Structure formats: C-alpha cells, structure tokens
Amino acid sequence: AVFGSAPGSATPPEHRIHSNPISPSDLSKQDISTLLGIGHFYFALTRFSFWGARTVHSRGRPALCYKSSDMRVKLTYALPLAQMVLASALIWWSELWERAANRICDMPGPAPAFDLLVSINAPAALVRASWRRLPYSVFHPMAAFLLDNGALVIAIGLLWYWVALNIYSWRLRRTVFIFRWMPLRLGGDALLIAVGVFWGISGIDDGRHSIVWAHARGMSCFGPYVWSRWLPSIAATGLDFTWCFALIYLFGRDFLHGVFRKTPVQARPAQN
C-alpha cells in the first residue's frame, strides 16, 4: 500500500509519501515579505506618550489586528477631504443665494445653505465665531471673504480628521482620542462636554423655530418658508442634538473614567 507504508513494505521508497511537518517555531519566524502575502495587518507595537493611543494587548502579547491600518488610513484622509469639499460647495451655494437675495431684501441674513454648513460642522463653526469679524475689519471685503471662509474650510478638515481618529480609537479601544496627561485629559473632556451642552441649547432653539416656521406661509428672501426656513431648521435641530449627545456621552464617559481611574474596556483584535 502507498498510504501508511511501514518499514519493510514492498512499496519502493520513491513511491512513498513523506511528511515534513513545520514546527511552531518556524511559523513564528516568518519575515515581513511572507506576512505581506497573507493579508492586511499591522502590529500594534507603538505607544504615544502625549496622546492617548496605547498598544493593544491580548494575553500579555501585542495583538495582531487585521485590516485596521487600512481602515484608519482611508478614514483619516477620506472623511476630512469629503467634508472640506462639501463645505466649499455649501459656501459657494450660500454666496450665490445671498447675492440673489440682496436684490430683493436689504438684510436677508444667512442663507439656508450656510445654516446647514454650521450645523454639520458645529464645533468648527463655534471656533469661527472667535475670528469672524477680524478679517473684515482689516482686509478688503473680497480678501476678507476668502480668508474667513478658507480658514473655516481648514478648520472643518481638522475637525473631521479628529472625528476620524476618535472613530478609529473607539473601534480599537472603546475610548476617545484625547490627551493622556490627566489634567489635560479632564480639562479637554470638560470643555467638550460644555460644547455639547451649548449645542443642545442651540438645538432646543432651532426646534422652537422649526415649530414657528411650520405654520408660516408666504415667501422669505430665499424663497418659500417651507423649504428656505422650515426644512433647514429641522435639519439643524437634528444635527445640533447629534453633536450634543455625542460629545456629552463620549467625553462625559471618558471624564468619569479619568476621575475614578478606570481603564476603558479594549476591543478584541479582529479575526479572519
């Protein structure tokens, strides 16, 4: 017989099946070129001293997390870029809308497209309020417009880059991306909780306005009330409350963990 031939079998040596088992030590010594052919992976071997990124460990050893690095790279670049493109489009649309409204109204106010931009990027819009008047008091109106809105678009990109890092950190370690030094961590958490409370109050105000605009009839400087005021106010209400709940829950949770010195539960490494 060919299979399981015993010593002294009539089967010639060249027809026998020989098994060469690979020892576990050989598997553990694969080089990087071999691992690259297996699949997407990264070794969590680094530790940041300033930010809260930590090594993921599984039973005392660095964890091998598949496809996490690809997700991080795509998210941290694609999400900010998409939001910056959307912000630029809404600013351009708002400018065209306001020029048309100025022909029939003396003071039309902000266009609905700009209100939507503010609600989508609420924290960045709050930061913009600190420099909004400065460019227009120093530069030519056109230069001030470009400087103001260009800085806003950059701030939006940085905001969503930070959001992407928080998404990655939450998926990896079930915690937020913030400072590791405890005083800065607690201070940052408290500040972001306060921002969440602010946008919660703003959401209540927008909700009240949406009720008022729901019963309004006629035309505003930007068109019928139903879609120039009522629909944007509903969208603003939902986005304001989304920012409110996200900031208060995530950073309130991290604040409590910092106060009571609790370590967030780490996510298990993904398996094939």
Image (spheres, rainbow, N blue to C red):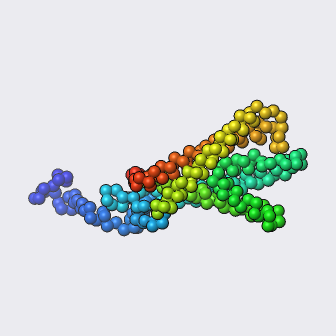
Q: Can residue 38 be seen in this snapshot?
A: no
Q: Residue furthest left?
A: 8
Residue at image x 25%, y 62%?
A: 23
Classify residue 134 as left or right of residue 69: right
Residue 194 placed where, x, y %? 58, 51
Q: Can residue 3 be seen in this snapshot?
A: yes
Residue at image x 19%, y 52%?
A: 3
Q: Residue furthest top?
A: 215
Q: Identify which residue, 39 or 213, lies in the foreground.
A: 213
Residue at image x 71%, y 61%?
A: 131
Classify residue 64 as left or right of residue 215: left
Residue at image x 68%, y 41%?
A: 205
Classify residue 47 as left or right of residue 120: left
Residue 71 placed where, x, y %? 50, 56
Q: Does 220 appear above or below 29?
A: above
Q: Identify which residue, 118 or 136, lies in the foreground.
A: 136
Residue 166 placed where, x, y %? 52, 55
Q: Identify which residue, 46 or 20, lies in the foreground.
A: 46
Classify residue 200 as left or right of residue 60: right
User: How many marks can you see?
Assistant: 0
In terms of image quadrants, where is residue 207? top right
